[in-house]
Amino acid sequence: VSTQSTGTVNDMVLYLIGLGLGDEKDITVKGLEAVKRCSKVYLESYTSILNVNKEKLEDFYGKKIILADREMAESDNDVDAMLNDATISDVAFLVVGDPFGATTHTDLVLRAKNKGITVEVIHNTSIVNAVGCTGLHLYNFGQIVSMVFFTDSWKPDSFYDKVKGNRSLGLHTLILLDIKVKEQSLENLLKGKKIYEPPRFMTVNQCIEQLLEIEALRKEKVYSEDTLCLGLARIGQPDQLIVSGKMSELMSVDFGSPLHCFIIAGDLHVMEQEMFNHFQKTSKQIKE
């Protein structure tokens, strides 16, 4: 998909390339060809992660990769430097999943277009369509919501009303779980210290705890411990895990390493119910 800007500065291109969900080989042929043409290759590393490290990507792509963390993304100077590079040579910006899976990347496209830079988007699988592997029909999903890590003083519950709306229509709710990569504590941020916290990835279990905590506060009976749900881990990777059951049952399941996401089931079609039952058997095996 080419998003041509009016009055482009030259024939150079900024490529936004989706990497899919698995490993270095999930990139499309078109994406790999574009990477090999680029003089600089950036890897966005703050909205999601792949199952392989940067070095493995470099070996497969045959290119050195520059990590684009949140700090870089929020620095106008760093982003402008990358866009300036795209006015003199082809530049690739690699994104785990699909380039537009995170709204952050829309801003990058707009900034490039305002500079007269041609942007070409090469799509790939994202968690939004990969959840079809659960057997739930994609057109039966409602609004997607995000669950962030709660703190003692900050427990946002805006997701609750969206889940309520979805469930009132019998729709499933996909919940994307928070990740914290190269984040600073509030204390270090205020002191201006470049000290970063260890990476954290929310688990299905933590998500359920927070969901039930907000239900206990709101008391609108949107869901409960008996609500049917699915926990997902490492979708698109060889050891992906899907477990279905009641919310209370999933609390005791060890979903393993990241990334996780969570689905609150709506009304189940007959075929959806069959697949749900299939993944429930997996749940019993894990507990044994």
Image (tube, rainbow, N blue to C red):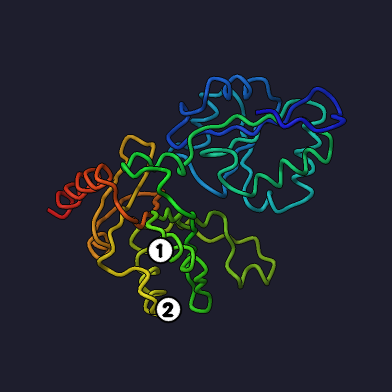
Residue at 37%, 64% (x, y): give it: 206
Which residue is the site of mark 2?
Answer: 218
Question: What secondary structure is marked by label 1?
Answer: helix
Vertically, is 11 above or below 245?
above
Residue 182: where, in percent of width, then height?
57, 55
Residue 183: where, in percent of width, then height?
57, 59
- Give the farthest residue toward the left: 288
Residue at 24%, 48% (x, y): give it: 273
- Three-letter code, disc 2: Arg
Which residue is the site of mark 1?
Answer: 168
Q: Nearer the viewer, residue 50 or 21?
A: 21
Residue at 52%, 24% (x, y): give it: 28
The quarter of the picture where the N terminus appears is top right
Please tell me how crowded label 1 is: few (under 14), some (14-19), or many (20+) other residues with Cα within 10 Å: few
- Three-letter code, disc 1: Ser
- Give the farthest residue toward the front: 169
Residue 141: where, in percent of width, then height?
42, 50
Whether residue 118 sits left or right of residue 173 in the image: it is: right
Vertically, is 213 above or below 74?
below
